[in-house]
Amino acid sequence: MNAAIRAVTRVAHSQGCRIFGFERGWEGLINNVFRELTPRSVGGIIQSGGTILHTSRCLEFETKEGIQKAAETLAVNKIEGVLVIGGNGSFKGALELSRKTDALCIGIPASNDVFGSDETIGFDTAVNTAMEEIDKIRDTAISHERIFIVEVMGRTRGFLASTVGLTVGAEIILVPEAKFETGKIVKRLETNAEKGKKSGIIVAAEGVGDTRELAMEIEKESGVEVRLSVLGYAQRGGSPTARSRMLASMFANKAVEMLLDTDSNSIVGLTDGKVEAMELMKSCENEKPLDLSLLELANVLAS
């Protein structure tokens, strides 16, 4: 997000715009807490993870009263355009806000669940962070001849789990979009053992259920030691990869262009290798499908 904030600020400033960053997202917009951003104030942040503006879950913004307060803040400060960096939930909030304000709302995707973008900023960084950690866990799994369940982010969607699972050579990938049975997992592990595999990695999105309980069930039914490793918030931090920095810069440039040259509430995104725009309403009303063929490929490669 910092790379996007930096790019938005500098591109907009080059076009003669003033830029204000609201602290903690919607919370700052509701409470009118912001800082003016300049090319110099965003210097030295492109390599930093997270966001200098901070972020928080704002339950008040989910109410009509909260949205009205946010709209009033925009009016008081004579804000003409709002750039929202976030995921599907943030964009649905932006859509509601757009119905209460004349300010244009443009979304920059920072979560891979956004319909309208093949890839989003930060995704490549999260994948590489998880991959590096799981590579280390693989060494331990092989040395101790154990099965490891590694839980990654994904409360409702399996984009990260499927990509990470494929790239680390996971024996099994579990995502919310595909039902699974513990018995079938045990059977596959037994088949692998017959082939000479005495260790294995199971990558699971957090939204598949209680992974601790799953680990105990697999160990009980298989007789093999199973350990759970939850990567947690480590996936959200760290220096962004070159890919994430590039997408953040390209998305920000397109977003500012949209603010200045259109009158349509939209999101920017990557489609077939090109940075393009899509109507905000269309993005919010559609669900991005998970490519389940990645799971099939992972199964073949792990055999």
Image (spheres, helix red, strand yellow):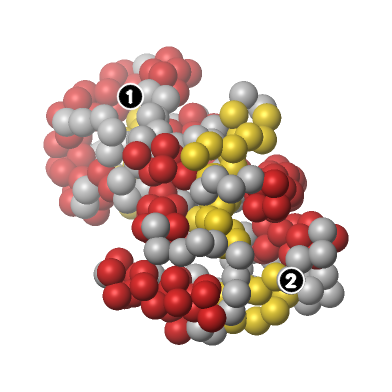
The foreground one among 103 and 268 is 103
Which of the two residues, 155 or 76, is positioned nearer the viewer here? 76
Residue 61 in which image quadrant: bottom left
Of the two numbered discs 2 and 1 on the same chain, state the one appearing first in sequence: 2
The C terminus: image quadrant: top left
Residue under the image location 58 percent in, 79 percent down = 77
In this rendering, is residue 38 above or below 31? above
Secondary structure beneath dot 2 equals loop
Q: For the point 38% across and 23% down, which residue is it?
A: 292
Q: Residue at x 42, y 37 (%)?
A: 282
How far from the left and from the top, in percent, is residue 105? 53, 56
Q: Is residue 141 visible?
A: no
Q: Are marks 2 and 1 in contact (CB under 8 Å)?
A: no
Q: Amino acid at mark 1?
A: Ala
Residue type, mark 2 in image = Arg
| 220 on left or right of 87 | left
Q: Which mark is residue 69?
A: none
**Residue 192 seen from this side:** yes
| Residue 202: quadrant of the picture | top left
Q: Which mark identifies residue 18? A: 2
Quick check: 110 left or right of 253? left
Residue 70, position as x, y percentages in the image: 43, 73
How would you rate the neighbour count of disc 2 (Cα within 10 Å): few for under 14, some for 14-19, many for 20 or more?
A: few
Residue drawn where x is 70% and y is 46% of the image: 261
Judge left or right: residue 114 versus residue 22. left
Residue 193's label in the rendered image is 1
Q: In this view of the protein, which residue sits in the foreground, 167 or 219?
A: 167
Tally the numbered discs: 2
Q: Where is 203 relative to 206, above or below?
A: above
Q: Is residue 27 above or below residue 173?
A: below
For mark 1, give the secondary structure: helix
